[in-house]
Image: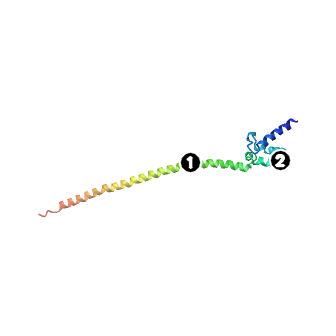
Amino acid sequence: LDAHHTLQKKVWHHIEKNIDGNLSHLGLETKHAPRVLSFVHQHGTIDDLFRLLKSRNAAEVFTNPSPEKERMSRQMEKMEKENELLKEMLELEREKSEDLHQENNYLRGLFRNREEAKECCLLPIFKLLDVWRLFIKTLREPALS
């Protein structure tokens, strides 16, 4: 027997045995897909060819993304990274905004309390002034006796 023919039989036997399972240990890439399909078609049946295409590793080996899909995939990955970064920045801005909002409310409360305190403190002074005016007024009036 021919050594090449023997090797092909061994390879076919191995592929046939693992055709429904995982052929990833063979290290097949997309560029090998035409030769693998041709080999299976030569040594097996149409059913074997379909079984290979339906197998778990078929999606990895027999997909050939278009250049447009490759370009779009890279753009999508880039945009996803940017989106994650923007989400993190948004969260930081929201936290900062919330802190500023709380500080603003605190300062507004202090200002209101200070205004109320001024009004409360000024009321007794006005009352004292009124009492003093009344006292002065009564001193200036002539005594009736």
Name the residue located 38 percent from the left edge and 55 percent from the top edge. 112
Name the residue nearer the viewer: 134 or 77: 77
Q: Could you say whether the residue bearing mark 2 is in a helix, strand or loop?
A: loop
**What percent of the width, then of the height, locates residue 2?**
88, 36
The residue at the far front in this view is: 17
Splitting the image into 4 quarters, where does residue 109 fall?
bottom left
Q: Residues within 10 Å of mark 2 (few under 14, many from 20)?
A: few
Q: Could you say whether the residue bearing mark 1 is in a helix, strand or loop?
A: helix
Q: Are marks 2 and 1 in contact (CB under 8 Å)?
A: no
**What percent of the width, then of the height, locates residue 102?**
45, 51
Name the residue located 28 percent from the left edge and 58 percent from the top edge. 126
Residue type, label 2: Thr
Q: Residues within 10 Å of mark 1 (few under 14, many from 20)?
A: few
Question: Between marks 2 and 1, how big is the CA–CA gap?
Answer: 55 Å
Q: Which quarter shows the C terminus?
A: bottom left
Splitting the image into 4 quarters, where does residue 113 fall?
bottom left
The residue at the far bottom in this view is: 144
Name the residue located 65 percent from the left edge and 47 percent from the top edge. 78
- State the residue position of label 1: 88
Tell which circle, 2 or 1, labels the residue nearer the N-terminal end.
2
- State the residue position of label 2: 45
Residue type, label 1: Glu
**What percent of the width, then of the height, locates residue 75?**
67, 49
Name the residue nearer the viewer: 34 or 101: 34
**What percent of the width, then of the height, locates residue 71?**
70, 49
Coloration mode: rainbow
Q: Which quarter shows the N terminus?
A: top right
